[in-house]
Amino acid sequence: MARSPAPPAAPVAAPPERGDEAPISAAERAVLEAVRGLAYGQIEVVVHGSRIVQITRSQKLRLDD
């Protein structure tokens, strides 16, 4: 069975100008740190009232046979 082609990607908004971006909060920095160095796995971010309240990092360790 042949796969249908993937739908076109949604347009991406241009990033804000360097001087216009808000500084990163401690919670946002914690999300970035959780992602860094993660080769295989997932990050779950729980948000309540527009605030990050929990970050869960699950990491898979790939072993060679």
Image: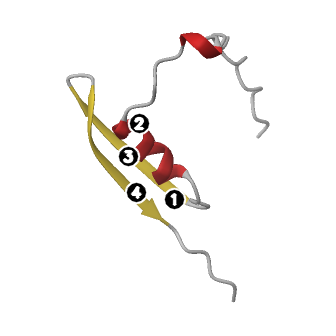
Q: Name the disc covering residue 41, or none.
A: 1
Q: Relative to 65, does residue 20 appear above or below in the rendering? A: above
Q: CA separation, marks 4 and 1?
A: 8 Å
Q: Name the disc covering residue 10, or none.
A: none
Tell me whether the residue at label 4 lies in contact with that at label 1, contact meaning CB atoms closer than 8 angstroms.
yes
- Tag 4: Cα neighbours inside 10 Å, few (<14), some, or many (≥20)? few
| Mark 4: secondary structure | strand
Image point 59% across, 12% down: which residue? 19
Q: Amino acid at mark 3?
A: Glu
Q: Name the disc covering residue 28, or none.
A: 2
Q: CA separation, marks 3 and 1?
A: 10 Å
Residue 52 as seen in the image, left or right of residue 38: left
Dot placed on the residue nearer the N-terminal end, 4 or 1: 1
Residue 7, quarter of the rendered image: top right
Dot placed on the residue nearer the N-terminal end, 2 or 3: 2
Q: Depth-wise, is mark 2 or mark 4 nearer the camera? A: 2
| Mark 2: secondary structure | helix
Q: Amino acid at mark 4?
A: Arg
Residue 3, quarter of the rendered image: top right
Which residue position is annotated with label 3?
44
Residue 57, quarter of the rendered image: bottom left
Tell me whether the residue at label 2 lies in contact with that at label 1, contact meaning CB atoms closer than 8 angstroms.
no
- Tag 3: Cα neighbours inside 10 Å, few (<14), some, or many (≥20)? few
Q: Depth-wise, is mark 2 or mark 1 nearer the camera? A: 2
Which residue position is annotated with label 4?
57
Q: Depth-wise, is mark 2 or mark 3 nearer the camera? A: 2
Dot placed on the residue nearer the N-terminal end, 2 or 4: 2
- Tag 1: Cα neighbours inside 10 Å, few (<14), some, or many (≥20)? few
Q: Nearer the viewer, residue 47 or 23?
A: 23
